[in-house]
Amino acid sequence: MSPFRTVSAWVALTLALAAMSVPPLRAQDGKPPLLRALLVCGGCCHDYDRQKTILRNGLESRAWVVVDTIQQGGTARESRIPLYEDPNWAKGYDVVLHDDCFGMVGDTNFIAKILAPHRAGVPAVNLHCAAHSYRVAPDLEWPRFLGIRSLQHGPASPIDVRTVDATHPITAGLSWNTWLTGKEELYNNITIHPTAQPLQRGRQGTNDLVLTWVNHYGKTRVFNTTLGHFNETVSDPRYLDLVTRGLLWACDRLDDAHRRPFRPDADAAKGAAE
């Protein structure tokens, strides 16, 4: 188990620096080397206190991955979290999951610090409100990183999700092609960049929009889904399966060796033990 886990704001930079000296995780008992993932969350409007644990447990139960979490920024949309002030903030990680909501941060220099590791090749997973983070920035570099620009979402009501590309490695291995969610928010699509590849669309009323897609940011693989506002969705096995496969695809490790045999009760059992 990783020594970092959830860390408070005042030790966030220490975490980034400590990662520089952490040796790669090695294979044990014939298993592949563990992937090291960093989940960054915080900001407005979501139950990150619970969702970071749901996500961590769900991913670690389904893949040979260790997930460290950082929650910063309180509940404000305007927070520029201290983690990203260190140029080595992502060093030592195989993939970064952005699950935050900082829509009113428009400082292009600050955003460039976030994107620097991804420009250099660190894969990314962007969940839900990450699609609305940094949306006021004038240079629109964050949407280019995502692959889709979004500015608004619909009401909290069910979304009829359907797979539109069942041949992609992420969706081809799912046990489902359609899903009527509980209450969720459907994000609009202002711009879909040519580097983006839609995998799933969602229908809510008269709106029919892309909600799961992959992108190539230069040579870097980026997986995105705007699903994940409510805990009911985040804890749904269908969501956790989707995000796990997206993470492994981003790392170019979507294979039998890196997927763990999954027990349906694994998430609940692990959560109760912690």
Image: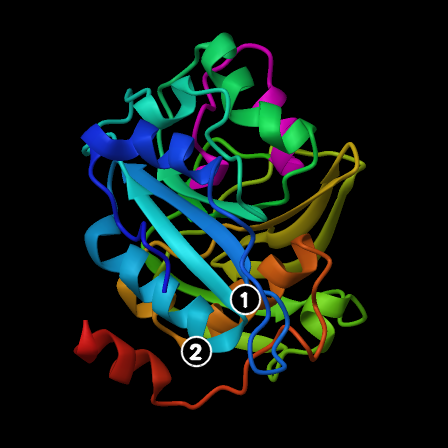
- Left or right of residue 272, residue 215 in this image: right
Seen at 34% across and 71% down, the residue is: 235
Q: Which residue is mark 2?
A: 237
Quick one: 187 or 120, which is closer to the camera?
Answer: 120
Please name which of the two marks, 2 or 1, marks the residue nearer to the observer: 1
Q: What percent of the width, then of the height, locates residue 243? A: 53, 63
- Left or right of residue 178, residue 102 in this image: left
To which quarter of the image does residue 123 belong? top right
Q: What percent of the width, then of the height, locates residue 81? A: 31, 24
Quick one: 157 or 105, which is closer to the camera?
Answer: 105
Disc 2 crowd, CA 10 A, few/some/many (<14, 14-19, 20+): few
Q: Earlier in the sequence, mark 2 or mark 1?
A: 2
Magenta region includes residue 146 = yes
Rendered view: 127 above or below 161: above
Q: Element type at marker 1?
A: helix
Seen at 35% across and 69% down, the residue is: 57
- Disc 2 versus disc 1: distance between alpha carbons? 10 Å
Q: What percent of the width, then of the height, locates residue 92? A: 53, 42
Rendered view: 69 above or below 248: above
Which amino acid does the dot numbered 2 rest on? Pro
Seen at 37% across and 58% down, the residue is: 2
Rendered view: 182 above or below 99: below
- In the rendered image, the quadrant that contains the C terminus is bottom left
Q: Can residue 235 be spotted in the picture?
A: yes
Q: What percent of the width, then of the height, locates residue 26? A: 57, 64
Seen at 46% across and 56% down, the residue is: 227
Which amino acid does the dot numbered 1 rest on? Thr
Residues in magenta? 130-148
Q: Which residue is mark 1?
A: 244
Q: Element type at marker 2?
A: helix
Colouring rule applied to residues = rainbow
